[in-house]
Image (tube, rainbow, N blue to C red):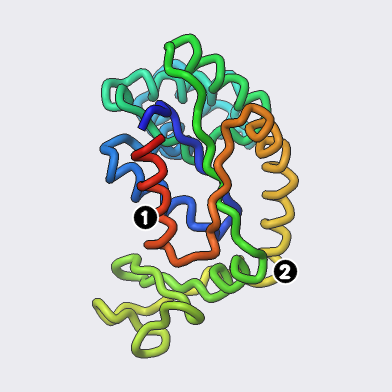
């Protein structure tokens, strides 16, 4: 795998987190979540973490220069030498340009962007049917992967919970917001020849196999 940075794009329910974990495990590279590293920087009270904390406590968005700085610190760590996956970043063209400049400055080439595309009807079923065990966190789906006993986890008998915001009206709003936010990024990376469209309508194991085969040759 020649690309030093992989970026996963995909609407809520597209399965980008699942596929990112498969790729990270297979290639032995870290999956970097901006939410996780922001919380870690705040906890460790780094200079950038304290700047982020002040904004978060004031109920304001953490500015790009702080988020970008925290990302740059994280990808400079030794476990990122072979490559890394960015999860939830970039979200804007400005952040995408920052990633390009950061990689160029480190002599690490362009990122490879994987856009997992799933039809809206399937996304709705994945999200509306999702249930999570209150004990072990196992995820079920009433359409595709139902428990043996309705409302009960197969593994430990825990109660299955359905998120209140996993309803059709809210999900459609989330999908619309995602497409408005992400479409410029897709066009940006397509224009650079750095975008790989992935058919996310297949079974997860089929998608993972195709991705790993492609990345092993890339």
Q: How many marks?
A: 2
Horizontal and vertical percent position of residue 133: 36, 72
Furthest residue toward top: 105
Residue drawn at (34%, 65%) of the image: 137
The secondary element bearing badge 2 is classed as helix
Q: State the image quarter where residue 203 is shown.
A: bottom left
Give the x, y percent position of residue 167.
64, 71
Image: 32 above or below 65: below
Circle nearer the N terminus (2, 1): 2
Foreground residue among 92 and 192 = 192
Location of the C terminus by quadrant is top left
CA–CA distance between discs 2 and 1? 34 Å
Task: Give the residue displayed 37% in from the left and 62% down from the top.
Answer: 205
- Could you tell me residue 1's position as x and y percent? 36, 33
Name of the residue lying farthest toward the bottom: 149
146 w.r.t. 86: above or below: below
Instruction: Judge depth for marks 2 and 1 and give the one in front.
Output: 1
Quarter of the figure with residue 6 = top left
Q: Nearer the viewer, residue 49 or 202?
A: 202
Q: Which residue is mark 2?
A: 169
Name the residue: 72% across, 50% down. Answer: 177
């Amino acid at each position: 795998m020649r690309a030093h940075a992989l970026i996963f794009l995909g609407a809520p329910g597209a399965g980008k987190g699942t596929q990112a974990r498969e790729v990270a495990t297979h290639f032995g590279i870290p999956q970097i979540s901006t939410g996780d590293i922001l919380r870690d920087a705040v906890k460790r009270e780094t200079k950038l973490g304290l700047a982020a904390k002040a904004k978060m406590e004031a109920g304001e968005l953490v500015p790009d220069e702080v988020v970008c700085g925290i990302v740059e610190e994280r990808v400079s760590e030794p476990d990122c030498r072979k490559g890394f996956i960015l999860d939830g970043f970039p979200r804007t063209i400005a952040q995408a340009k920052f990633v390009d400049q950061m990689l160029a400055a480190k002599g690490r080439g362009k990122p490879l962007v994987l856009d997992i595309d799933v039809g809206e009807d399937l996304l709705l079923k994945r999200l509306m049917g999702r249930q999570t065990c209150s004990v072990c966190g196992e995820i079920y789906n009433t359409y595709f992967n139902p428990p043996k006993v309705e409302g009960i986890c197969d593994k430990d008998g825990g109660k299955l919970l359905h998120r209140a915001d996993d309803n059709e009206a809210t999900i459609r709003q989330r999908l619309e917001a995602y497409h408005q936010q992400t479409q410029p990024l897709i066009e940006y990376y397509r224009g650079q020849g750095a975008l790989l469209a992935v058919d996310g309508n297949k079974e997860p194991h089929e998608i993972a196999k195709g991705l790993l085969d492609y990345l092993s040759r890339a």
